[in-house]
Image (spheres, rainbow, N blue to C red):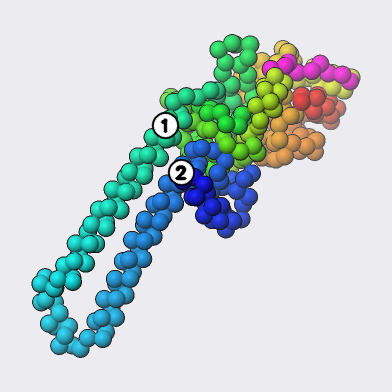
């Protein structure tokens, strides 16, 4: 079924401007859940499409028939409908078709839902994703506390493994949406929702907050790397390591500033005195693809701009513009760049 349905889905995806594999596309086949959604979508599209064409067909036939008939026939016509066997057969057939179509759609929905629920019942990994205005706090759970880790604005998932993601919010309602991998699910303050994803294709995908959550809603993206088991374990092990000690005098000056001044009140860097929790964890900050939840790519220039004046780049975000002196700015950026 998946194989047969996959071809038209891919043909449809070619109509999108986006690259269905690596960007944001609901026509992807990158996870078990999205394949199920797409199969269901195609079944609904076909059934509703056939119904629509039949309605238009009958309507057109009726118009043509009336046009051809003279005014006398038209007056007669209304009287014999009930007794016309052809008309009765058409009406009964039409009612039966509608009934069969609706029951068929209900059955297709039921099986699609069951199959997604089966995948969700046996997750092998659990992640807690907490939304904040306007970034994602990511916590990988583990029975062994020394293997639990915290990062921000990116998820790494092993291919072929069902992952349950628990969704929370610290402030307002946000919505988790990675179109290539899963449907939407809201993150609501005071409650925990969850969604299960079983990625099937190695690649990088983009997610976006899909619920208007304030001025920087558009700058609340996250990247999802689906990796082989070996790459995922390598990433996990690397994330568990503490930040490297600064190796140059400039980076040392940055370390001193970050760990003893304003920065450490909000940010944590494992292995240093910085242990704030209200902002993103920075232990492996420089290994991420973007700065400020997808606002800009990770690069030295963007890092300078962000540290110097975060309020002009993402107005309203909770990181204040401190007003660093040039030498402080150089040292802080030099230190942050070591956090690979
Ligand atoms: Cu968070 Cu929109």
> What residue appears at the point 58 percent right and 22 percent down from the top-left corner?
139
Asked if one can make out residue 317 in the rendered structure from this viewpoint, the answer is no
Identify the residue shown where x is 65% and y is 26%: 229
In terms of secondary structure, what is the magenta stretch mainly?
loop
- On screen, residue 34 versus residue 117, left or right, reads right
Residue at position x 29%, y 51% from top? 102
Residue 117 is labelled as 1
Left or right position of 16 against 79 = right
Q: Examine the rendered structure and indicate whether residue 156 appears above or below residue 39.
A: above
Q: Earlier in the sequence, mark 2 or mark 1?
A: 2
The answer to which image quadrant residue 107 occupies is top left
Secondary structure beneath disc 2? Answer: helix
Q: Which residue is tagged 2?
A: 37
Q: Please state the horizontal and vertical placement of residue 187, each as a whole percent of the image.
A: 47, 31
Estimate how packed mark 1 is, as few (under 14), some (14 to 19) or many (20 or more) residues with alpha carbons within 10 Å: few
Query: In the shown orientation, is residue 78 left or right of residue 115?
Result: left
Residue 199 inside the magenta-drawn segment: no
Which disc is residue 324 wearing? none
């Amino acid at each position: 079924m998946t194989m047969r349905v996959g071809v038209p889905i891919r043909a449809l995806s070619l109509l999108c401007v986006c690259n269905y594999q690596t960007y944001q596309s609901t026509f992807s086949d990158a996870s078990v859940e999205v394949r199920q959604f797409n199969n269901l979508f195609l079944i609904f599209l076909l059934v509703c499409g056939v119904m629509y064409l039949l309605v238009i067909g009958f309507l057109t036939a009726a118009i043509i028939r009336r046009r051809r008939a003279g005014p006398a026939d038209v007056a007669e016509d209304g009287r014999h409908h009930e007794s016309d066997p052809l008309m009765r057969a058409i009406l009964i057939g039409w009612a039966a078709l509608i009934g069969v179509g609706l029951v068929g759609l209900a059955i297709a929905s039921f099986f699609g839902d069951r199959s997604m629920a089966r995948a969700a019942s046996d997750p092998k990994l659990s992640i807690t994703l907490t939304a904040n205005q306007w970034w994602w706090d990511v916590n990988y759970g583990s029975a062994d506390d020394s293997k639990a880790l915290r990062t921000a604005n990116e998820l790494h998932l092993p291919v072929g493994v069902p992952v349950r993601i628990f969704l929370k919010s610290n402030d307002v309602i946000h919505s988790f949406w990675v179109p290539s991998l899963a449907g939407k699910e809201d993150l609501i303050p005071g409650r925990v929702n969850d969604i299960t994803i079983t990625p099937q294709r190695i690649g990088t995908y983009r997610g976006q907050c899909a619920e208007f959550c304030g001025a920087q809603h558009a700058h609340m993206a996250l990247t999802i790397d689906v990796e082989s088991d070996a790459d995922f374990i390598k990433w996990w092990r690397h994330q568990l390591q503490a930040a490297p000690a600064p190796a140059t005098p400039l980076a040392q000056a940055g370390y001193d500033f970050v760990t003893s001044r304003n920065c450490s009140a909000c940010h944590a860097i494992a292995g240093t005195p910085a242990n704030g929790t209200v902002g993103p964890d920075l232990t492996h900050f420089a290994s991420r693809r973007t700065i400020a939840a997808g606002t800009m790519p990770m690069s030295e220039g963007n890092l300078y701009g962000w540290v110097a004046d975060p309020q002009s780049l993402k107005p309203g975000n909770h990181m204040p513009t401190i007003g660093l002196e040039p030498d402080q700015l150089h040292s802080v950026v030099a230190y942050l760049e070591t956090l690979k």
